[in-house]
Amino acid sequence: MNQKTSHSQRRLSKKGIVKSLLLGMLYLNYAHAGNELEDDSYFPAARMSFGSQANVRLFDEAANTTAHQKGMWSTSGNWPLYAIHMALLPNGNVITYGTDESGRGLGLAYDVWTPSQGFTDASHNTLDITTDTNVFCSAQQLLGNGSLLISGGDQRPNGINGAGIKSANVFNPNDNSMSLTGEMNQQRWYPTLTTMPNGDILVHGGRIDKETPTTLPELYSQTSGTWSQLHGADSPDVYSVKGWYYPRSFVNNKGNVVFIKGNDNGVYELDAYKTTANGQGGINHKINTGTGDFKFFYPTVSYASGKVLAFKEGKKVYSININNFSSKRLANIPSERIWSDATLLANGEVLISGGSSVRQDLDSAHFTAEVYNPENNTWRTTEAAQKARLYHSSAVLLPSGAVLVAGGGPPGPIYQLNAEMYYPDYLFDANGNWATRPTITSITTNASYDKNISVKYSGNRKIERITMVKLGSTTHSWNMGQIFREVNFKERQNNRLVIGSGQLTPQKMTPGYYMVFVIDADGVPSEAKIIKLS
């Protein structure tokens, strides 16, 4: 069990770094049955408090006169490691990992950040990964009990550069501990995790070594903590070239996984539960999407039910319908943004932050961000940030409605041990001052698909929208956690709103944790409450 200490109390000493390296070199290929996941007392959902960080501002920042049009960036603050991986947790905290504290590509440490404490040393709890797993360039996805599944990583501590591993870890936000769960059947570096409608977790993509992609998808059972191979979906052609590199994957209304991949203009569908002559699972190529290929260094995001926003070179933007397998060319993004991050905002707009016009080129780095409005198919430019964010940066939407942006590091050309906050324009009134926001006073925190969700709020303005954003989990320009859905509701007496159960399905909104925002007539969102949908 890891001991909880603040970052101000602990940094990895040189001796600690050497110890971590030695432990990595002596890395044991643990075989672990994952039985702890069968015991509800190990990760008791009932003990987990769902997060809500009360103060949107990390500093006493005064709004500027253009904040209601362009948003506003905070002062930057120190970060204890390069935030290559970032995930919002159900308790409102944020976990980042990917390097040790010296900044090398050795994911042998992780940090838990408490947003309400701002960018202070006391807000960080930086710990060793005691399972001796290098989680550099792994995949992460929240489980139904609120813990974080981290699958795969790098064999580099074993002296092998560029090779994947079979290990899978589980981070428990109740006590900030890390433990091994069942080992995957295949080695994976750069894989993707996707939550299925029944709660299983699909892993696909990744590579075994520099020459060998991992071509066989697997399913993780949250009940047993073990993995099963989908032999019917074994696809060397699909996962060749850059097809293994974090496939951009989403669930459609049939409950299948639809994905795009690097250096390809196609859209693919994976049926994890199909029975074939070769075994369970199957993959089919569905459509091609115009000229040019999707690239592994652009983000992709599910911005509406059944619709995915995807990018190609030359500032091209496409909307892909993953239900009827059609695509539509949208308005070009104003700037070429290689290694940028796409973050769904509380109102359904999409923030594209960081990146550069030329790959890994600091001179062409973008300090401003772009915001896409799906309703009118337009882009607008934000205020400029203080820091450039290139390869190995990350971003997630917080319950406050602000966006945490951090990282950008190995192998350079710039190393960012810092973070910033972007405050979207919906947090400001027409005069550029901080807006008065509605407040959710109570909500159904443990929700089910077959029951209504009750929301009570306070505030003087009528609520016009309710939106739900699944908690983000991002790395390498790919947020494999977030989805955005706007839901219909009925208004009752005493500021009570009811979200009808009929529109909530596990295909449209896969099981897991969602931020719920109520938005008033001025377009100002409340701070979110986090609920569990299962």
Image: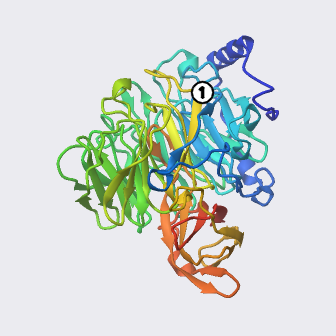
Q: Residue at x 59, y 30 (%)?
A: 418
Residue 228 at what x, y percent from top left?
Answer: 53, 48
Residue beneath disc 1: 107
Instruction: Answer with left or right where residue 212 lies relative to residue 312.
Output: right
Residue 210 at what x, y percent from top left?
Answer: 39, 24
Q: Residue at x 46, y 33 (%)?
A: 389
User: In this figure, which colouring scheme has been used for the structure?
Assistant: rainbow
- For the C terminus, the image quarter is bottom right
Residue 84 at what x, y percent from top left?
Answer: 53, 33
Q: Residue at x 63, y 56 (%)?
A: 399
Residue 400 to residue 437: above or below = above
In which quarter of the view is residue 271 placed?
Answer: bottom left
Q: Of helix, strand and loop, which one carries label 1? A: loop
Task: Identify which residue, 323 or 526, lies in the foreground.
Answer: 526
Residue 180 at what x, y percent from top left?
Answer: 68, 37
Residue 378 to residue 416: above or below = below
What amino acid is at disc 1? Answer: Gly
In which quarter of the view is residue 349 placed?
Answer: bottom left
Instruction: Answer with left or right where residue 305 lies relative to residue 129.
Output: left
